Image (cartoon, rainbow, N blue to C red):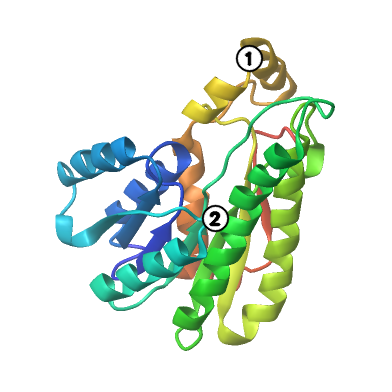
Amino acid sequence: MKLDGKVAIITGSTSGIGLDIAKCYLKNGANVVICGTNPKKLINVTNELKEEFNLDNFLVIKADVTSTEDVKNLFRETINKFKHLDILVNNAGVAPRSSMEETSDEEFLKVLNINLMGAFKCTREAISYMKDTGGSIINTSSFVSLYGSPYQAAYSSSKAAINGLTKSNAKELGKYNIRVNAVAPGVVMTEMVKNDCDEETINRLNLMTPLKRGATPDDLVGIYLYLASDDAKFTTGTIINIDGGLVM
């Protein structure tokens, strides 16, 4: 199995893309730490996973990536249970829609705090655990980081910043054999997208996509598996578009 014996933390993994990544990693032999902030989702994902996977191979933790103390505790608990860390997937994020005129300072900063600062805090914390052994850090970006999106200035800005964080950290952390890459999905039919985008917007984006549909989380997990595995041992600093050809 591609990830046999490896340990992965995946933020924002109680649903959507993050949960599918967690399942993929577990099926490929990894020990996985799943985290989120919604208590009901944490219970549901625990019950769902224990039907298919051994409880010894995963850990579910309540953690808010905007809290430095929560992030530190997330890594402490991971090391306490699994003794080392090989993979960090910075996937936690929000994507609210509002016009520039109506977006308050607080709303804009909330998006940056979760999407960007969360990835920053988790990456900063991961370095000391990966310095001696190497590792893979994978950030979830978005096609809007390159393409932009009306009514999503905060989200687009946060994902453009994720691309910069990815490339800068790849250059800085390569000396420790820590690889840093990002995945930039197109339209993915997650609960978040369905809640935040109207049907007209989704249909328009699907028509603009050469493959003429939005992605499912399952369409994306293969690239997260590749980047986490030793198959990608010489891949770093890349932003990989998985968008059906929407941006090219």
- Image x and y of residue 8, in percent: 39, 63
Q: Residue at x 36, y 63 (%)?
A: 2
Residue at which label 2 appears: 66
* Crowd class of label 1 (few under 14; some 14 to 19; many from 20; radius 10 Å): few
From the viewer's perspective, is 181 left or right of 153?
Answer: left
Q: If you read the primary sequence from the N terminus, does the residue marked by circle 1 or circle 2 appear first? A: 2
From the viewer's perspective, is 115 left or right of 71?
Answer: right
Mark 1 or 2, closer to the camera? 2
Q: Residue at x 80, y 27 (%)?
A: 150
Secondary structure found at label 2 = loop
- Image x and y of residue 248, in percent: 79, 40
- Residue type pointed to by label 2: Thr
Q: Nearer the viewer, residue 184 or 116?
A: 116
- Image x and y of residue 211, in percent: 64, 26
Q: Is residue 242 visible?
A: yes
Secondary structure found at label 1 = loop
**Quadrant of res 54:** bottom left
Q: Residue at x 62, y 12 (%)?
A: 199
Q: Nearer the viewer, residue 47 or 53?
A: 47
Quadrant (top left/top right/bottom left/bottom right) for the N terminus: bottom left
**Quadrant of res 44:** top left
Tell me whether circle 1 and circle 2 mark residues in contact (CB < 8 Å).
no
- Residue type pointed to by label 1: Asp
Residue at which label 1 appears: 198
